[in-house]
Image (cartoon, helix red, strand yellow):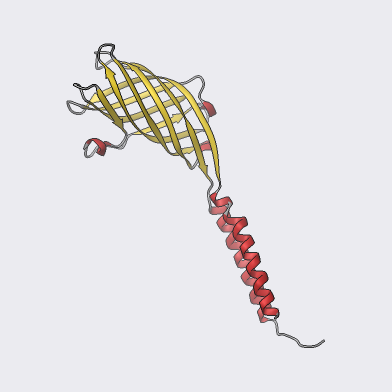
Amino acid sequence: MLSSKLIWSTSAFLTFCLGAFTSPAMGQSIYNFTANYDTLNTSKAISSSISEAFITGESNDALYGLNNINGATYTQIGFTTGIFRFNTYPATFGLQGRPLGSVVFSGSGYNKLFGTDSATGIIDFSTLTATSTGAFTITGGEGMFKNAIGTLAFSEVDQLNLKPDVPFTGRAVVSGTIQIVSEPNSSSMAFSFVMFTVVGILFRRFRQPIRFGR
C-alpha cells in the first residue's frame, strides 16, 4: 500500500516536472519587422545570362537598429522576356564551385540578422525599371537575434542603367516576423537535476526497512 502511494505520488510529480521544464524549451519570442531600404546594386557577369549581384542599403526607419543591409546573390535574366530571378544558392542556376551567397541586416549596435534570399521579377526595357518580389529566409543572428529564424517578405523597384560598371539604385520594402528560439540547455539541465533528485529520494526511501506496529 505504501509503495503504491509512493509510486503514484512520484508519477504525479514527474508529470508536473515534465510540464514545468520542457515547455520553456519550446518557447519562442516573436518580433514584427518592417523597414524601407534605399539600395545600391552592382553585378559581375559569370555567363551570358547569369551574374553575381551585390546589394547594399540604408534605412531610416528599420526596427531594432537594423539600418543597413548587405548581400551577395546570383541572378539570371531572360533578355527576350525580361523575366529574372535571383537566389543565394548557386546550385539553383547550375553553378558549381561557387560560394553560397548571404544577406546581413546590421546597424551600429550588436543586433544582426543573417539569411538567404530568393526572388523573381521582370524588367521593363522601355523604362529600364526592374520590379521584383521575394523573401529573405532568416537563418541566425547576433545580439537580441541570437538563434533567430523567420521569413521577411520584400518587394523592390530598381532603376537600371546601361553602364555595367555603375551601380543602379533601388528601393526595397521589407516586412515579416522574426522568431527567437529559446535554448533548451538550461531547461534540460534543470530537468536532469530534478530527475536525479527524485531518483535519489526513491533510492533512499526503498532502502529504509518497513516497520510494522509502533
Say if 203 sits above or below 42 in the image: below
Say if 213 sits above or below 117 in the image: below
Q: Residue at x 66, y 77 (%)?
A: 4
Q: At which x and y percent is residue 41?
A: 33, 21
The foreground one among 104 and 23 is 23
Q: In which quarter of the image is residue 43?
A: top left
Numbered-mark total: 0
Q: Which residue is drawn at 40% across and 33% down?
A: 136
Q: Residue at x 44, y 26 (%)?
A: 174
Residue most toward the bottom? 213
Q: At which x and y percent is residue 93?
A: 23, 35
Residue most toward the top? 127
Say if 23 sits above or below 45 in the image: below
Residue most toward the left? 48
Q: At which x and y percent is residue 186?
A: 57, 53
Q: At which x and y percent is residue 164?
A: 24, 17
Question: Is 61 positioned to the left or the right of 5 in the image?
Answer: left
Q: Residue at x 62, y 65 (%)?
A: 14
Residue most toward the right? 214
Say if 80 sits above or below 213 in the image: above
Image quadrant holding the N terminus, namely bottom right
Question: Is 193 positioned to the left or the right of 111 in the image?
Answer: right
Q: Quadrant of residue 74?
A: top left
Image quadrant holding the C terminus, namely bottom right
